[in-house]
Image (cartoon, grey):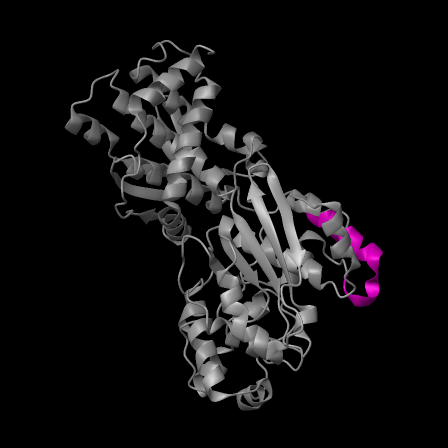
Amino acid sequence: MTATQPLARVWLPSDGTALGVDWSGSEKAFKKIWCSKIEFGSGGACLREVQKPFSSQGPASISSHFAQWLEAQEFDVAGLDFCFGLNAQHLQSLALPNLGPVTLGARIVERWSTPEAFRAAVGAERKRETDRLQAAPFAPTNLRMFRQTYWGLVALARHREVPPPWKYGVRRNVVEVLPAQVARMIAPGRSYKERTGQAARRALVSEVERACRLSIADELRSVLIGDPDGDAIDAVLAAIAAGSARAYAFIGAPDSAVGTGEGWIFPCRAVPDRRAYLSGAVGPEAWPRDVIAAHEAGHAMTYLACGIGVASVEAIVRRVPTPTGTATRFGWTESLEEQWTTSLGLKDGDARLARRLLGKAGGLAGEMVAGLFDYDESAPSARDDVAQIGAALVRLGILSPGAKETPEPCVFAAVERACGLLQSHRHDFDELRRRLMVEDTVVPAPVRVTWDDDDREFVEELAAKTSGR
């Protein structure tokens, strides 16, 4: 990959809003701190704001007001460009807590009133595990970094919520990000800081637009290109990393990130590539586990949201017997739909059977909510789901038993409603995805039933779509 050939698709969410904050601990922090806001949709993303949110203030004043400023913003996830923790040896030797940046920041400001006193106490600089893995240029207490770390942790000391990976919320998650990692991923080798000039920044912005399907208005593009230090661009890259982290459910932080208190840089990721398998270039074992986790979690949560139990969810690729031989199965959700149907005494034609149809549509809905759906890649791998939706339409009396194909409008209608159910259970959906990334088989916890749409109205909608009305 060259600097002029960005990744085909950065993994971003299909909905929601991300903030990106490029932080500074300098005496003129108000001139260096930038904030961006990106809104995500199924058709791409849009940069809404790039600005310096503070004026005529130094780091002490900004840090004291930062939590209040953040509280006033609307966002689903915010990416902050400073270290949320220290090296484990430093935390241990100084008897500092490992409970996350809120507690750590509060303890630091109690013990050291200046960043210089803080750095003197910490001593020799040491990178964290996440710094090494993400190739961060500096350790948290590096001579060029310690003020940024100190004032960032002091700012989070007043924040109300414990951030990932210590705790995962439904909305307003705040995560540590590294803009340099995003730039390396999208345009490796591309320099855009300081003396590189406007042409280099213009080229990087163009590559970010393509790789992220990001729409940028002319006036905001001028701001990004015109900032000679590249800090405005870093704020946008921070929001992209934050959005990407939300899309993949903040998966990937090892237990040590929490256990040691070092924290975790949530990187920007590419959409898992299924094309090699679909083309026959690799075997089924190469099917991305991220996709399996989202797909099966989607099935499970949709069933549960409809009041249908789920015995277990599996994230294993395996060969299974079929009437004509064997087939590859990419994960499995063991629903209790037959028991549910029997317990209610439902017969064919009962509108409540539409809930079974929604459960079968939940896999594709899971991919959509996770920002993973691509028609050319998702549809071929979900032929069995589509066939089962067709079978459910037969049981509802919408299709005749001899029907050869499942009408696409019915599939889209079912997936759309299933997406709504998953969004109402976003925290449970994401938690199941996280578990399926590390556990082959999971027994999901019960969830609140939220399907309250009229079954008959939904069945009538499906029937109308088969008749072309």
Q: Identify the residue at horizontal 67%, vertical 45% (top origin).
A: 211
- Say if residue 216 shows up in the picture: yes
Point out the stretch of residues depicted in magenta.
192-208
Q: Identify the residue at horizontal 48%, vertical 43% (top origin).
A: 370
Q: Nearer the viewer, residue 37 or 255?
A: 37
Task: Give the image location of residue 436, x and y in percent.
Answer: 39, 49
Q: Nearer the viewer, residue 69 or 207?
A: 69
In the depicted structure, whether residue 145 falls above or below residue 390: below
Task: Give the image location of residue 161, x and y in percent.
Answer: 41, 65
142 sits left or right of 453 in the view? right
Q: Is residue 128 magenta?
A: no
- Say if residue 329 shows up in the picture: no
- Place residue 422 in its image quadrant: top left
Task: Give the image location of residue 387, x and y in percent.
Answer: 40, 22
Q: Nearer the viewer, residue 368 or 335?
A: 368
98 sits left or right of 137 in the view? left
